[in-house]
Image (spheres, rainbow, N blue to C red):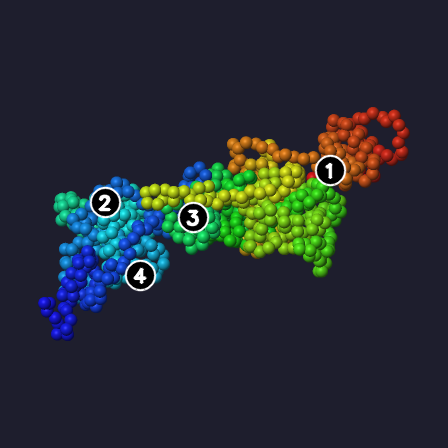
Amino acid sequence: MPKKRSGGGLSPVQQAAKFLGVSVLAGAVMAGIALPAAGALGLAAKGSVQGFDDIPSNLKSPQLSQRTTILDSQGGQIATVYSRDRTVVELKDISPYMQKAIVAIEDSRFYQHGAIDLKGVLRALNQNAQSGGVAQGASTLTQQLVKNYFVEEAGDDPTKVAQATQQTLGRKVRELKYAIQIEEKLGKKKILENYLNIAFFGQQAYGVEAASERFFSKHAKDLDLQESALLAGLVQSPTRYDPVNDEAEAKKRRNVVLQRMAEVHDISQAEADKAKETPLGLNVSEPKNGCITAVKGAGFFCDYVREVFLNNPVFGKTKADRAKIWNRGGLTIQTTLDPQAQQSVQKSVKDHVNKSDEVATAATIVEPGTGKILAMGQSRPYGFGKNETQINLSVDRSMGGGAGYQPGSTFKPIVAAAAIEGGKPATQEYPAPYEMEYPSPVAACDGKKWLNSENAKLTNENESEHGPYGMKEATAKSVNTYYVQLISDIGICPVTDMAAKMGVSRADGLKIDQAPSIALGTQEMSPLTMASAYATFADRGTYCTPVAIESITQAVGNQKRSLAVPKSKCSRAMSETTADTINTILKGVVEDGTGTQAGLGSRPSAGKTGTTDFRYAAWFVGYTPNMAGAVWVGDPAHERRMVNITIGGTSYAKVYGGQVPGPIWRDMMSGALAGKPVQDFNLVDIPDSNSNRDAGQGDQGNGNGNGDGHGNDNGGQDAGGLVGGLIGGLGTGGTNGGTNGATTGATAGGTFPSPSFSLPAGWFQGNGNGGNGNGRRRG
């Protein structure tokens, strides 16, 4: 009978022996208890057999968190992101030296014992009992693997990590049962492979492949003897033996491993001694984690991909579910990013705007008909330093962007589309004076009315801009008063409805105001929103939601599976006729309107400029049939007005949409479209409005020898200019286009036959104000 202490209890060694006996009877031996002997007393006496049997026996190996690789549409790597830097490899891809080193230093009897090492347990218990503390542990590699499973499952939750690593008898017993299960299920080689892939080696490196790349910039299969010994020594205390921060301590630990390898006859003593004399031979690679490492300035697009994943229910019911998958990693995400377009965007941005400028620029290109985001860039790089930012200036706030920026006159084509779709002709005219009060009342949604209770006024950009105007000319000249009259005529609700159909919403998530001023672009939008909206025009009226992800594969063990990804949803926003009409109008903006500096030469394009009040923002949004892009320039903080300012080394008294954003758009689209098919729009015939077809304005030229020759630059007010222009148009040259109507039209614009009928005096004379030969075709 066991000898009892005077107090009636068993001695520490006796109680430990009793516990061991119970465990053996239960079909297992408690191994690796690194506890003070006294601390095990009470625990050992508490029915451990029942607790052991109650532990579930269905432990599953967790899916190890790994790197996620983000690729462009051609398969080129954009960036790698991870919560834990790990690349899982098979045992055959791990150096034999590394396999031997980890076994030698962590569990030299690994191939001789089962889930536990009874000799090691007895040795550890004896040593710990004598020291009264944790002097020695006896966990096998299998038990360590189980513990790492629980740590991996805990993720970044500090409470769960503490529970997974706490030094309690209950945890050790649980580890033991699972270790037995794993030994039976996996076998030694698989256990060793899993351990080498899950262990933490320090410097953000999880698993031997990441560690090998971090410390030696090579694959794990290429590790030599001394490199393997160094890494094997790290797992006991990655911080203490970190070779980057303490080379001397790391070398001591490495040499301990080398000596142990010699003692267990993995290498000879001579090999160990020789290896001990070698330097560490580090070739450290800096951790390359996250979108900050993205190539070609695609950091913001990379960040957008992450936001899509975390926000889209297709990847999980809750945000927590989606975050768990993202943090687990092991994903290969092929995106829609076109490397040619992305490179062109970044080059254009860099050529036109410096990152240190007082204002910034953001640009986005999408593909009409698919919604694919082809490029996304900005002048302030992705980062944390000076003149850097993590705010994606191209997207809405909910996706990592800011509050957006007023799009100015780039919103006007949406008003025009709503009007045409509702039955207004493209020739619709309004007086459009230079200055006017907002019309009132104006029909809004839900039967409500907007009232100009404050007698608010608006003006055009220049006093020379006054009507009457038709839609084509008013758009080319970006006439504010025309568009306020237009929205007041058709009502606000058709415009907000059209905006919704085109995916246009405020970047801050608020609703678009029910006021006629929205026609002038007063509601904050993002470049991605505007590019996608204009792609609707390019695709002849079909809007497609923007998408950034083509496909995702997920590594599960040694297998890969495909994940469902969000698809673009395309819907008709307007008729083809309406879209074709807008395309015709906006083509004129680029050809001879405010957007001439954005023209693409022989490649047909269309677009619209935008400049906000006080010049806090300037835009150009344009498109070809196969690409649509938006460029914004301004101060993200909405504080610096763009007057008397230097941008990209060029000084500007005032910044206009066609002046700075326009050339950025031109250059980025030219490069993005290089080598792509040249496509044309389906144009419609839009007759000039009455004010442009009356006296003096024909359809053949502009009075400088191109066959227009109208009587005055206001279009002529009487029939004299009309006839003079028509007859002058018969000529082949002309320098003045008709100063005094028919007489000058005949001599300067070309000869014409004498009429065989008599005309009233002054018929050919015009109104006497004399066109000056440069009255251009409106619109």
The residue located at (74%, 44%) in the rendering is: 429
- Which residue position holds label 3? 291
- Which residue position holds label 4? 163
Left or right: residue 261 versus residue 679 is left
Which numbered disc, 2 or 4, marks the residue that appears first in the sequence?
4
Give the mark toward the camera: 3 or 4.
4
Left or right: residue 184 versus residue 297 is left
Q: Are marks 1 and 2 in contact (CB under 8 Å)?
A: no
Q: Which mark is residue 189?
A: 2
- Which residue position holds label 1? 688
Sort mark 1 into few (<14), some (14-19) or many (20+) by Cα contacts within 10 Å: many
The residue located at (67%, 43%) in the rendering is: 421
Sort mark 4 into few (<14), some (14-19) or many (20+) by Cα contacts within 10 Å: some
Sort mark 3 into few (<14), some (14-19) or many (20+) by Cα contacts within 10 Å: many
| Type of amino acid under label 1 | Asp
Disc 3 versus disc 2: distance between alpha carbons? 36 Å
- Quadrant of the rendering where the C terminus is positioned: top right
